[in-house]
């Protein structure tokens, strides 16, 4: 090493130094992530593609990032190039850039732990909610130590390089300045023209595709594509054909005005039913529930529950409760984030591409279950353990006539513990019980949607509650199970308990990483209907979607409003033997799973098909079934257009 330092320094340009450091850091990150995924998950051909494709994306990202330094080199007067203080500034800037590149790589690594993807539109969203996101990171990781480590490594890199290279100081000729000017203009233009984030999809292995990407490039692409217009990016069919296809599979969605007209003409039964006149078609319920408590549990994959095969005893209470509940064996989440789950559990719409509807503008007075029930005299609540400003949750639910309560509304004395993401689930449930008890005084039935937070990084909760350590997903799952148990035991003492249906469901799974774009098994979520006075225990064995829960609840409550939705009332679907199907998605890929076949619609009008093993849910590529493809298109196309054209609004005089 000493001999190396004594060697005459190599002369390089500042821009070349930046490019070399960036390429080295990004290559190292790609190697680390590949090893973490597991080389057994990747073929030799895929590994080669990861690094070849990855180099292409790295160069394409640098085509933009190097522009400022080319401009500085172009505009700097020749007289300053050899100044000693200018050289010190160059090395100082090199140190700052190295720190930033390392910080970006560490940030990508942390993001990968959560989502197993390069930066995407989720990362773009997180820039808006810096308090929650930065606070979450601070509580989950030793941030000061990480920053000191990054700074130390950046210093060592720059110090070492300063011993073996020096910056060019020769005068810039007119010819060379012209070359720099041409590079400054042409590099970003060429990158824009020839590089597209869709080129990441070079294989059928989702791991390989994500590993080949570049975080800076994919982040920029996500910022541009935060909203994906279905008609522009996806395969379409004539709208009349789409509506005909939906009708053929039992979807005959009606607008509010059509439903009101039918009710007024007597074609539909009144929305006000007593427990005694329960439609026999809605068996196995003995009588209608008066109230509904919908608990959407953060990130609760079905694989964590003993009822669905887990042997770790992470959910002892829910395992017990399953023996007293109607358990739905094959229900699948529509997406990968809480806002997707909230879409499904409020407006029951297939997951249209881009942002979830909860997070979009102009979402007031939609035909949500809360809006529909509020009109019929229910007290409707959205009770959240975190800050409802995150992902526009407060705005969305308030705009749809829910009474919104989040952590800022809880009396501090009622909170056992909290982190930046939310209060502990016990405190959330205790406050919820108080709210529901207060509602009894109004003598109004209630619909309460309670959203938990404890099963989310940083996975902290009150001490001495369970036998697993804090800071782990397994511990958080077991604590949430404990908190649900405490809530249920207290609810049993309430006078409104015997008339209440409790629905326990996940908002989404803990992880959706897999070799395929949409690994079906990673969307499998639990769903329990618990109402011991109203409903015998058992199992619902048909496949269903998260969007089927809302129309099912509206049917059980005796309204005609289930006809607003794309989802099926599950008991009616079983009685009529309607086709079983479900919907899974990420922010770009839209999946339609039916008859052991998964149809995947992607941007650039691409369509893929996979044969799904009914037991393992493993996928293999298959020929496209055009009937199923048209059904998939019909659902997603009509849903996207309905939102775009305001047809999801609840127009009530």
Image (cartoon, grey):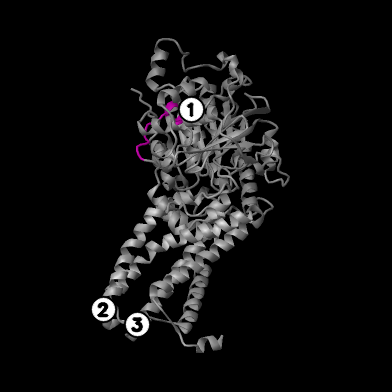
What whole-number distance in Å separates the C-alpha atoms at marks 2 and 3? Answer: 11 Å
Q: Closer to us: mark 1 or mark 3?
A: 3
> Is residue 134 visible in the rendered structure shown here?
no
Q: Point out residue 42 in the picture as x, y percentages from the top left corner.
A: 63, 54
Q: Point out residue 562 in the picture as x, y percentages from the top left corner.
A: 49, 23
Mark 1 secondary-structure assignment: loop
Q: Point out residue 96 in the picture as x, y percentages from the top left corner.
A: 41, 72
> Which SS type dominates the magenta stretch?
loop
**Farthest residue toward the front?**
175
Identify the residue position indicated by label 3 in the image: 169
Please rate how many residues cluster around mark 1, counting C-alpha atoms within 10 Å: few if below 14, some from 14 to 19, many from 20: many
x 39%, y 62%: residue: 63
- Quadrant of the frame with the N terminus: bottom right
Q: Point out residue 281 in the picture as x, y percentages from the top left corner.
A: 59, 16
Identify the residue position indicated by label 1 in the image: 566
From what the image shows, is residue 400 above or below residue 11? above
Q: Upstream in the sequence, badge 2 or badge 3?
A: 2
From what the image shows, is residue 256 above or below residue 168? above
Q: Upstream in the sequence, badge 1 or badge 3?
A: 3
Q: Closer to us: mark 1 or mark 2?
A: 2
Mark 3 secondary-structure assignment: loop
> Is residue 385 visible in the rendered structure shown here?
yes
Q: Upstream in the sequence, badge 1 or badge 2?
A: 2
Please rate how many residues cluster around mark 2, counting C-alpha atoms within 10 Å: few if below 14, some from 14 to 19, many from 20: few
Indicate the quadrant where residue 14 lies: bottom left
Callouts 1 and 2 close, C-beta under 8 Å? no
x 50%, y 70%: residue: 150
Q: Which residues are magenta?
A: 361-372
Identify the residue position indicated by label 2 in the image: 77
């Amino acid at each position: 090493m000493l001999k190396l330092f004594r060697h005459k320094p190599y002369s390089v340009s500042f821009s070349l130094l930046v490019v070399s450091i960036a390429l080295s850091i990004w290559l190292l990150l790609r190697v680390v992530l590949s090893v973490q995924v597991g080389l057994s998950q990747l073929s030799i051909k895929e590994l080669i593609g990861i690094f070849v494709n990855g180099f292409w994306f790295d160069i394409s990202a640098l085509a933009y990032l190097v522009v400022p330094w080319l401009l500085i080199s172009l505009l700097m007067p020749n007289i300053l190039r050899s100044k000693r203080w200018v050289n010190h500034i160059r090395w100082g800037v090199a140190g700052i850039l190295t720190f930033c590149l390392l910080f970006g790589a560490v940030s990508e690594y942390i993001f990968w732990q959560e989502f197993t993807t390069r930066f995407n539109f989720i990362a773009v969203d997180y820039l808006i909610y810096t308090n929650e996101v930065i606070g979450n990171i601070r509580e989950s990781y030793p941030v000061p130590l990480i920053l000191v480590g990054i700074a130390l490594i950046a210093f060592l890199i720059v110090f070492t390089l300063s011993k073996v290279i020096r910056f060019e100081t020769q005068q810039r000729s007119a010819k060379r300045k012209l070359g720099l000017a041409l590079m400054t203009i042409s590099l970003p233009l060429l990158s824009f023209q020839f590089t597209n984030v869709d080129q990441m999809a070079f294989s059928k292995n989702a791991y390989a595709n994500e590993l080949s990407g570049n975080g800076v490039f994919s982040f920029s692409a996500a910022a541009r594509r935060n909203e994906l217009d279905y008609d522009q990016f996806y395969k379409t069919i004539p709208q009349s054909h789409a509506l005909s296809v939906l009708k053929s599979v039992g979807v005959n969605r009606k607008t509010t005005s059509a439903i009101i007209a039918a009710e007024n003409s007597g074609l539909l039964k009144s929305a006000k039913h007593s427990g005694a006149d329960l439609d026999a078609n809605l068996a196995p319920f003995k009588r209608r529930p008066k109230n509904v408590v919908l608990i959407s549990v953060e990130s609760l994959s079905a694989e964590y529950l003993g009822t669905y095969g887990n042997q770790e005893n992470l959910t002892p209470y829910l395992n017990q409760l399953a023996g007293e509940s109607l358990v739905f064996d094959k229900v699948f989440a529509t997406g990968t984030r809480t806002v997707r789950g909230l879409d499904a559990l409020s407006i029951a719409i297939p997951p249209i591409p881009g942002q979830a509807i909860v997070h979009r503008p102009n979402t007031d007075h939609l035909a949500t279950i809360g809006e529909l029930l509020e009109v019929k005299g229910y007290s409707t609540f959205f009770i959240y353990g975190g800050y409802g400003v995150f992902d526009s949750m407060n705005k969305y639910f308030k705009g749809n006539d829910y009474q919104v309560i989040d952590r800022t509304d809880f009396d501090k004395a009622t909170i056992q513990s909290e982190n930046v993401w939310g209060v502990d689930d016990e405190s959330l449930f205790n406050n919820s019980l108080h709210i529901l008890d207060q509602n009894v005084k109004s003598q109004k039935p209630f619909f309460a949607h309670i959203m938990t937070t404890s099963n989310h990084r940083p996975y902290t909760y009150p001490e001495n509650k369970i036998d697993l350590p804090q800071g782990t997903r397994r511990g958080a799952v077991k604590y949430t199970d404990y908190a649900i148990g405490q809530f249920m035991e207290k609810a049993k003492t309430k006078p409104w308990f015997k008339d209440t249906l409790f629905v326990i469901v996940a908002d989404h799974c803990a992880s959706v990483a897999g070799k395929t774009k949409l690994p079906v098994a990673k969307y499998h979520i639990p769903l329990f209907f618990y109402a011991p006075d109203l409903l015998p225990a058992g199992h619902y064995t048909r496949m269903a979607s998260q969007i089927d829960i809302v129309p099912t609840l509206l049917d059980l409550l005796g309204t005609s409003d289930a006809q607003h939705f794309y989802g099926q009332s599950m008991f009616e679907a079983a009685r009529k033997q309607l086709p079983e199907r479900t919907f899974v998605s990420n922010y770009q890929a839209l999946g339609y799973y039916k008859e052991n076949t998964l149809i995947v619609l992607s941007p650039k009008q691409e369509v893929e098909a996979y044969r799904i093993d009914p037991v393992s849910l493993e996928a293999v590529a298959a020929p496209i079934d055009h009937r199923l493809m048209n059904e998939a298109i019909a659902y997603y196309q009509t849903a996207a257009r309905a939102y775009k054209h305001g047809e999801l609004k609840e127009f009530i005089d």
